[in-house]
Image (cartoon, rainbow, N blue to C red):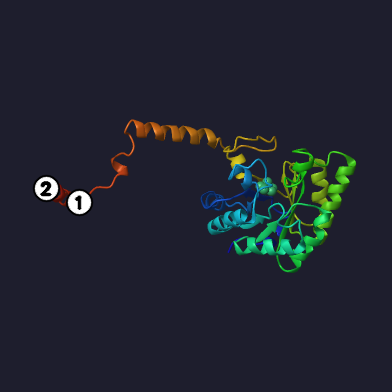
């Protein structure tokens, strides 16, 4: 049986929660095998999988496809899928309909961006049995439009707004809250103040868990290089040099080698040659 929302909530104050984003079957299988707690089908897929400038163009159809690929791969992790821009801000009914689509595609829970203004939407989803992960601080779907990538919660007033948003989300029933690019002082205050786990991305060590975009931590996505990312591999270099080697092997006839080919039965081959000659 895979992890449940309750398992994740119960980890608060006991064990740190590990999350990576996942969008495809192959990488999701590897992350699940590695024992990661949550596979997040983030709308960052728009950037790292589809080459968009930001997450705004991502559609429900795309998120449903990525979610079904990740759900097919997972054996142990919890699967959470992002509601894309304008799939839930328009009305509570849209939020319910679209969350239902992601759950049908295989997600165990959905994530949406926003603080107190999203409380009614969150409680409506939770009431009908759809678990919700909150997301405050830098909210790529909207903060980008107004401020660009900027650390959140650096002033007293901004910090108070973030704390109020976290409390409103908790009251509305989220099972955990992502804090993106929040100053580490504010992330700690929120983490101590709420009973649900906080998940940091660029928000310091005191959060109950951490999330990174898988392409960032594997060193595969070179378009942006945020300070909060730790690269555990430098796969882009390795992949480019592997593909160069492959190209060279083709050109110099070192690939395919004997081991990579299939042969006919020898006697059948002799018969075939005779028949062609005659
Ligand atoms: O879309 C995403 O990948 C996210 C995480 C980085 C939190 O929202």
Question: Of the numbered discs in the image, which one, if any, rests on residue 265?
Answer: 1
Judged left or right of residue 169, residue 199 is left
Residue 122 lies in what quarter of the image? bottom right
Residue 173 in sight here? no
Judged left or right of residue 135, residue 50 is left
Q: Residue at x 64, y 62 (%)?
A: 101
Q: Residue at x 77, y 61 (%)?
A: 91
Q: Nearer the viewer, residue 14 or 271?
A: 271
Is residue 176 shown above or below 157?
Answer: below
Question: Of the numbered discs in the image, which one, if any, rests on residue 274?
Answer: 2
Dot 2 or dot 1: first in sequence order is 1
What percent of the width, then of the height, locates residue 98?
A: 68, 61
Residue 256 in sight here? yes
Question: Of the numbered discs in the image, which one, if any, rests on residue 102?
Answer: none
What percent of the width, then of the height, locates residue 165?
A: 83, 52
Q: CA distance from mark 2 to mark 1?
A: 14 Å
Q: Residue at x 79, y 45 (%)?
A: 187
Residue 108 lies in what quarter of the image? bottom right
| Mark 2 within 8 Å of ligand 1, using the beta carbon | no
| Mark 1 within 8 Å of ligand 1, using the beta carbon | no
What percent of the width, then of the height, locates residue 84?
A: 68, 53
Question: Which quadrant of the rendered structure holds the N terminus?
Answer: bottom right
Residue 131 lies in what quarter of the image? bottom right
Q: Nearer the viewer, residue 197 or 94?
A: 94
Q: Nearer the viewer, residue 199 or 115?
A: 115
How busy is the neighbourhood of tag 2: few (under 14 within 10 Å), some, or many (20 plus)?
Answer: few
How busy is the neighbourhood of tag 1: few (under 14 within 10 Å), some, or many (20 plus)?
Answer: few
For this orientation, the residue located farthest to the right is: 157
Task: Look at discs 2 and 1 and give the one toward the viewer.
Answer: 2
């Amino acid at each position: 049986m895979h992890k449940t929302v309750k398992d994740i909530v119960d980890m608060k104050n006991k064990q740190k929660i590990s999350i990576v984003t996942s969008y495809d079957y192959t990488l999701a299988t590897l992350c699940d095998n590695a024992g990661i707690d949550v596979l997040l089908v983030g709308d960052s897929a728009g950037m790292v999988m589809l080459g968009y400038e930001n997450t705004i163009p991502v559609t429900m159809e795309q998120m449903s496809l990525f979610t079904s690929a990740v759900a097919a791969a997972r054996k142990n992790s919890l699967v959470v899928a992002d509601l894309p821009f304008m799939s839930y801000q328009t009305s509570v009914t849209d939020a319910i309909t679209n969350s239902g689509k992601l759950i049908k595609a295989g997600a165990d829970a959905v994530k949406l961006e926003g603080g107190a203004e999203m409380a009614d939407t969150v409680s409506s989803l939770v009431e009908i049995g759809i678990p919700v992960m909150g997301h405050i601080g830098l909210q790529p779907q909207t903060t980008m439009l107004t401020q660009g990538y900027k650390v959140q919660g650096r002033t007293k007033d901004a910090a108070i707004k973030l704390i109020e948003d976290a409390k409103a989300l908790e009251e509305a029933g989220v099972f955990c809250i992502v804090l993106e690019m929040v100053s580490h002082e504010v992330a700690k205050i929120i983490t101590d103040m709420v009973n649900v786990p906080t998940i940091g991305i660029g928000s310091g060590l005191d959060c109950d868990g951490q999330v990174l975009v898988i392409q960032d931590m594997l060193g595969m996505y070179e378009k942006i290089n945020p300070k909060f990312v730790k690269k555990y591999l430098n796969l882009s270099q390795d992949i480019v040099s592997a593909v160069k080697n492959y190209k060279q092997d083709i050109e110099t006839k070192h690939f395919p080698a004997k081991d990579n080919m299939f042969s006919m039965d020898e006697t059948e081959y002799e018969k075939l040659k005779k028949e062609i000659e005659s």
